[in-house]
Image (cartoon, rainbow, N blue to C red):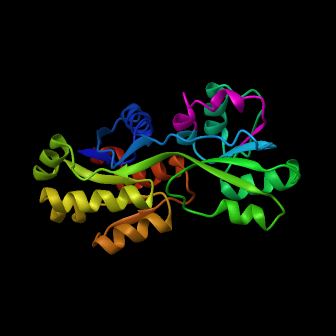
Amino acid sequence: MAVLVTRPQPDNARTTAALRARGYVALAAPMLRFEKVMFSLDTEADYGAVIVTSANALRGFADQPAAGNLFHLPVFAVGDRTAQAAQDAGFRDVISAGGDANDLRALLTARAQAVKPLLYLAGADLSRDLTAELGTRGFQVITNTTYRMAPVTDLPDDVIAAFATGEIEAVLHYSRRSARAFFQAAGVAGVEISALAIPHLCLSEAVAKIAHDAGATKVMVAATPDEDALFAVLARAMPPNAR
């Protein structure tokens, strides 16, 4: 029996590899597609620092004409993986908040100066208004969109076949948008009944609401919004002797 991973690449590949290392059969159906967005940098702006909340923002930033003008600035990253992506992109002074957007906001409040504007490298669809939140703390934040995640409308042929033969036993959902795209694609592919009948394991309550609204009846939520916690839910839903 197989576990279906719906998160976009390259995260999908990392997750499926981790599942296979744990002895699962893992199938991939990335339901969002990364697209770079070109931007022009305000060369007159005297930025004090760069903030990033996603490694994808650094993927979108790579090879941008403005990139070389920013490498001297400190970067405040939401977590360690995003911080590593910033270092890989060419930034030298990188500080990780080691958590989520709340931790990043707290780090900026404690460590950054509000004298110069912050440059926020972000995606086109933001789950929260970090710019406004920081504005209430005296920061001026200039947001530049470096990427978008476009919904994928079709399931891969091997995934459709696996649903048809009952091979997929659980689906992992990491975001509201990818979960919504999955259920829409399942309907288009004609496998909605099979898809709704199996467990849907979600990274957060917000993601779980999408599954509930779609009609899924077996919805489980990770204790904390991280992959280890999601894998713990999977181990309960699919114990070793069931695989």
Task: Determine the residue located farthest toward the front in the rendered image.
Answer: 44
**Image coordinates for residue 234, horizontal then vertical, percent:** 40, 52
Vertical comparison of 184 with 25: above or below = below
Residue located at (29% from left, 69% from top): 216
For this view, does 18 lie left or right of residue 70? left
Residue located at (80% from left, 52% from top): 108
For this view, does 92 lie left or right of residue 180? right
Quarter of the C terminus within the rendering: top left
Residue located at (50% from left, 62% from top): 204
User: Residues in magenta?
Assistant: 58-76
For this view, does 170 lie left or right of residue 95? left
Task: Report if residue 198 is visible in the image.
Answer: no
Residue located at (70% from left, 59% from top): 102
Of residue 195 and residue 79, the one placed in the foreground of this image is 79
Q: Is residue 39 magenta?
A: no
**Image coordinates for residue 239, horizontal then vertical, percent:** 36, 49
Task: Report if residue 49 is visible in the image.
Answer: yes
